[in-house]
Amino acid sequence: MEVSSEQTASSSVFSSTPIVSSNQPSISSAQPSINPSSNTAQSSSVTSASSSQTPASSSVAPIPSSSITPPPEDDYTVIETLNKRMPAEFEPCEQVMMCYPEMIDASVYKEIAKDNKILLLCNPSYNGSSRISDAQSWVSSNGMNQANFTYFDMNLDNDNAYWARDFSPFFVYNNLDLGIVDFTYNRSDRTEQNAVPKNLSTYFNMPYSKMSLTHTGGNLMQNGRGTAFSDDLVVLENSNDASKVRSEMLTYTGTDNYVITIDPQGEYIAHIDCWAKIVAPDKIIVAKLPTSNSRYQYYEQVANELANTKCSYGYNYKIYRVEEPGGSTIAPYTNSLIANKHVYLPLGDNATYNQKAIQVYQEALPGYTIHGIENSSDNDFKNTDALHCRTHEIPSIKNVFIDSREVLHGDVSSSSKLLVKCNVVSYEKANLKNVKLHYSINNGNYQVIDMLKYKETTNYTFTFSALKSGDNVKYYIEASDVNDNEAFDPVFKEADPHVFNVI
């Protein structure tokens, strides 16, 4: 099913502003029992969507160049992008890792390969021979774009080992170089999968390091700016030593803010991707159950906790709620894959809830293409295992990254310094070409102006100095390097910019 993110959601299944909770819930006091055990095998037909945005049509005179203030004085606090940084799933990716023999319907591989390159981890036959030739024939026979596939022999213990999310490494930028951080996979009976990160580091010729933590990819989300999220399975599996967990994550991945919650789902898997998904630096989708469901209070507890957590922009996360019917009905909506502004959304058993889920993603990610992946016997999606579990993105080494902090938002006094600042990094190690500010005043046409470089840093600034009380300002930043890699912050540009009001 192909849907457009221009469509307007017709039901109030999301909150486009943060949930407000006066009491921060306890992270540990209401922890349901967790019994980790082996994943069970599960695995659509496909659907897809796109949109475009148009800027406001009314006209407002641009800020005259004479009113642009120079870079700030020495009280300016330089933004320093983390030397070690885990990129978020919603950042540009080079490839999507999936497993062969196929563990999802071939139509899903084909759909993802239309717009992304795929690395197939080919599990060798039990006689030790390569399966790459089998995989190549399978790709061709199913009408896929062979040019978008590469292949790597990778022992995975058995043909049911296809949870690429869980056993694949954490990819981490160390300064401007992408490397691999390994951990002990929390399935002790899957020794071959536990070796995958080391093998991939050789294959990609990437630097390799290993934490002492037991962990799993399905229980980690990150915002790309030093904040990560897990439920407390990661603490339980590391001798209940939360300080060790935080210390290792800081040392190896640059995570300086590790938000560890309870597991509201209360299932054996205890993976955060089964009930939540971070989709932007300031947006998280959280599942919502009916009030009659016995787990309802736990879902509300974590939703309120996340809504009281500040994002790197300086305000609380915006929480979007995706409704699930509860019970045995399949509704794996947060277990989606984001790859290069495409969302591959696993659908469930109930068409009404499926459509509501699509609408939530459209609202949260304007301009993204939403591919609804229907369930089938080949996909066998479950509420504990769907598309995110069976894929893993490989970050790009050619992207430009705009690191914005403490952006102008909400009500801002006209007497304060209306400063926009950011740090810009080219991971291809190319010189920057442009750093521009796009802004609109009182819904006028967007104007574009070059931001000013601050001294010998890669920080860029702009100060609004011709605004008056009552003005509403929308803005976003554009940056590009000489190799024409480009980035926007927010990535949604005019569709969902930074906004502030002058008072």
Image: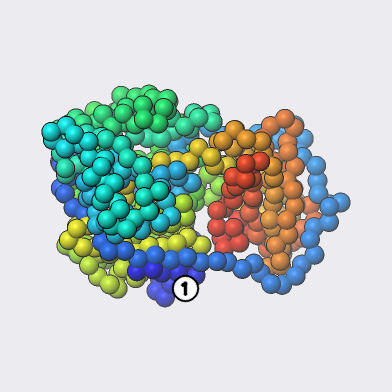
Q: Residue at x 71, y 66 (%)?
A: 445
Q: Which residue corresponds to mark 1?
A: 8
Q: Is residue 170 left or right of residue 313?
A: left
> Percent position (x, y) of residue 202?
36, 26
> SS of the residue at dot 1?
loop
Q: Residue at x 36, y 46 (%)?
A: 149
Viewport quadrant of the C terminus: bottom right
Amino acid under disc 1 = Thr
Kindly give the residue lying farthest to the bottom in the view shown: 10
Question: Along the horizontal axis of the image, is 492 left or right of 220?
Answer: right
Q: Is residue 372 visible?
A: yes
Front position in the image: 214 or 409:
214
- Examine the rendered structure and indicate whether residue 490 appears above or below residue 187: below
Residue 212: image quadrant is top left
Question: Residue 194 in the image: x percent, y percent?
Answer: 24, 31
**Picture coordinates of residue 333, whole percent (x, y):** 31, 59
Looking at the image, is 210 positioned above or below residue 169?
above
Q: At 59% from the left edge and 51% from the top edge, which residue is drawn?
A: 488
Depth order, front residue of 52/235:
52
Query: Which residue is outermost to the left?
Result: 127
* 488 relative to 46, above or below: above
User: Can residue 269 be seen from the camera position used here?
Assistant: no
Side of 23 where 460 appears, left or right? right
Residue at the image position 41 percent from the left and 41 percent from the top = 394
- Looking at the rendered structure, the number of numbered marks drawn on it comes to 1
Q: Name the colouring of the figure.
A: rainbow
Where residue 338 sits: x, y (%)? 41, 52
**Neighbours of disc 1 within 10 Å: few (<14), some (14-19), many (20+):** few
Q: Is residue 242 above or below residue 273?
A: above
* Closer to the camera in the image, 351 or 293: 351
The quarter of the image holding the N terminus is bottom left
